[in-house]
Amino acid sequence: MPQTDHAAPTAFDATVLPAAALQRLRDARHLLVLTGAGISAESGIPTFRDAMTGLWATFDPAQLATREGFLADPPLVWGWYVWRHAMVAGTAPNAGHQALAELAGRRRRFTLVTQNVDDLHERAGSGDVVRLHGSLAAARCLRCSRPHPMPALTLPAADGSRIEPPRCPACGNLVRPGVVWFGEHLPADALARAQAAADDADAMLVVGTSGLVHPAAGLPARARAAGALVVQVNPQPTELDAVCHHHLRGTATQVLPGLVRALGG
Ligand code: OAD
């Protein structure tokens, strides 16, 4: 259920996209979609950079999203990720995630790339999601990378308080969250797949990202340079405005269900 204070969803007006652009999306041989935190906002998961409500308005990324921050205070950082994991577990996919899952089912070639570390695309029915920034559910050993389950805590018990991270049963080192932190490389296979899709796609949708974090933010320009039509879905202007051919200024749940309907079967 949507839990934000956005205006109630309104139907997508297909006339805001020129007919030729809609037709190019419809006819795309390979459609690439890039999503960011905005697509999960209406499920109740805060974005990072929205004023007031974004996580980075309240929390310090240097402390909570870097290897150095984790090593300086492991219980602080682990407790924060346990809280985020529990928060995501208490949400459900919204109509935007569902529309993209439906769109995928209809295309011969469809690549969904996300910067999000929640699992709402998968829970909406999207398979084979290319995850550029890891997953809240994929904790692993800091040293040997052995996977480790996240604690099955739910809200309100997981309140962001400090929690001592578990130790790896194989090597005894600290278990770390499964997300990509600032200063770290993206998973090479995911990045390679995303870049190959940008080179191959003939149309791209860019949904709910500020376009500030590279290399993900470079994908729309790469797709455009390779000849793709690039359409942005976002209620606000972004860094990607100059790169995208068309802008659908609305939230994910306002725009995507109607857009997918307009694209037909
Ligand atoms: P940001 O928080 O930077 O941007 C969120 C974007 O979503 C903004 O452009 C908003 O205008 C837009 N938005 C807000 N509500 C929306 C809605 N209901 N529908 C559609 N769009 C909406 O999030 P990202 O661009 O995803 O990194 O941030 C990129 C990376 O920075 C994240 O993956 C994270 C963060 O640090 C890691 O975790 C490694």
Image (tube, grey):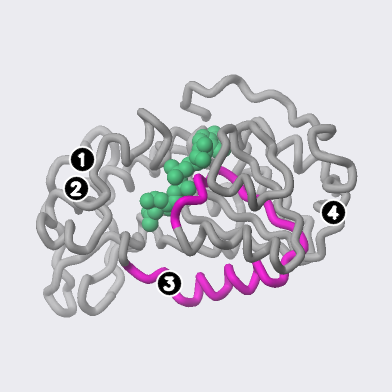
Instruction: Please state which of the two labelled residues, at mark 1 or mark 3, is closer to the viewer.
Output: 3
Q: Quadrant of residue 237?
A: top right
| Residue position for label 4 | 24
Among numbered discs 1 and 2, the one appearing first in the sequence:
2
Give how far across and how far down residue 248 sits, in percent: 69, 37
Give how far across and how far down residue 165 sits, in percent: 15, 58
- Residues drawn in magenta: 184-213
Q: Secondary structure at mark 1?
A: loop
Among numbered discs 2 and 3, the one appearing first in the sequence:
2
Instruction: Please state which of the two labelled residues, at mark 1 or mark 4, is closer to the viewer.
Output: 4
Check the image and report above or below for 189 versus 158. below
| Marks 1 and 2, how far apart at CA | 5 Å
| Residue position for label 1 | 160
Q: Specify the amino acid type for callout 3.
A: Pro
Identify the residue at horizontal 62%, vertical 50% (top origin): 206
Residue 79: image tag: 2
Ligand 1 within 8 Å of disc 4? The answer is no
Q: Specify the amino acid type for callout 4.
A: Arg
| Marks 2 and 3, how far apart at CA | 24 Å
Horizontal placement of 18 versus 59: left or right? right
Identify the residue at horizontal 56%, vertical 34% (top origin): 236
Q: Residues within 10 Å of mark 3 (few under 14, many from 20)?
A: some
Ligand 1 within 8 Å of disc 2? The answer is no
Instruction: Please state which of the two labelled residues, at mark 3 or mark 4, is closer to the viewer.
Output: 4
| Marks 1 and 4, how far apart at CA | 46 Å
| Residue position for label 3 | 187
Q: Secondary structure at mark 2?
A: helix
